[in-house]
Image (cartoon, helix red, strand yellow):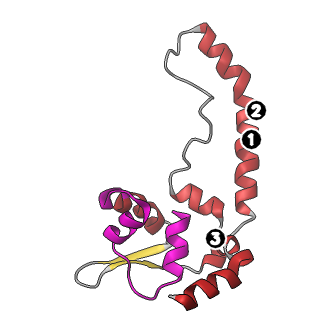
Amino acid sequence: MLHVLLHLDQTQDPVTSDQIGKMLNTNPSLVRRTMAGLREAGFVGATKGHGGGWVLAKNLDSISLAEVYAALGSPQLFAVGKSADAPTCLLEQAANRATSAALEAARETFQEKLGQVTVADLVRPHAQEIRQHQEKL
């Protein structure tokens, strides 16, 4: 969804869920469900009807990657980790105890690092290249 926020910043016109779906090669209904979290966080707004769509509601300099991660529901970072498949299993309990502290520390570090970067920071190193590309369009 960072990709979507960056594109919304480059246009003045609303962008439909269908357009975003084509850009991301996914279903527009999935786009709407995912964008709902960004809307609830105040990052985007939506207008209905002819000419409607998604628009950026907040400057990208004021949106951290940690805030985007939270707005998307803080998805699980690791395939390994605390499991509840068989809560009475002693082996599962042992695995959960062994990995919990390390995974929590990694999650905290990850979120701290995300909090230090804004969405706008993602394109700054490539600003000249992006401008040149847009001039060709």
- Residue 116 falls in image quadrant: bottom right
- Residue 129 falls in image quadrant: bottom right
Q: Is residue 125 left or right of residue 30?
A: right
Residue at figure coordinates x 52%, y 59% from the top left: 71
Residue at figure coordinates x 62%, y 71% from the top left: 63
Q: Position of residue 53 (x, y in %)?
A: 34, 77
Residues tagged 1 and 2 counted as in contact (Cβ below 8 A): yes
Query: Is residue 24 depicted above or below 131 in this figure?
Result: above
Q: Earlier in the sequence, mark 1 or mark 3?
A: 1
Instruction: Report if residue 21 lies within the magenta region.
Output: yes
Q: Position of residue 44 (x, y in %)?
A: 46, 74
Any mark on residue 119, and which? 3
User: Real-space Cα distance between discs 2 and 3?
Assistant: 28 Å
Residue at figure coordinates x 57%, y 56% from the top left: 70
Residue at figure coordinates x 39%, y 68% from the top left: 20
Q: Earlier in the sequence, mark 2 or mark 3?
A: 2
Q: Residue furthest bottom?
A: 135
Q: Is residue 114 left or right of residue 12?
A: right
Amino acid of disc 1: Ala
Which residue has dot 1 on it? Answer: 106
Q: Residue furthest left?
A: 50
Amino acid of disc 2: Ala
Amino acid of disc 3: Val
Query: Is residue 116 depicted above or below 14 in this figure?
Result: above
Mark 2, Cα crowd under 10 Å, few <14 / some 14-19 / many 20+, is few
Which residue has dot 2 on it? Answer: 102
Q: Position of residue 120 (x, y in %)?
A: 66, 75
Q: Depth-wise, is mark 2 or mark 3 nearer the camera?
A: 3
Region of the chain picked out in magenta, as a range:
1-30
Instruction: Report if residue 17 lies within the magenta region.
Output: yes
Residues tagged 2 and 3 counted as in contact (Cβ below 8 A): no
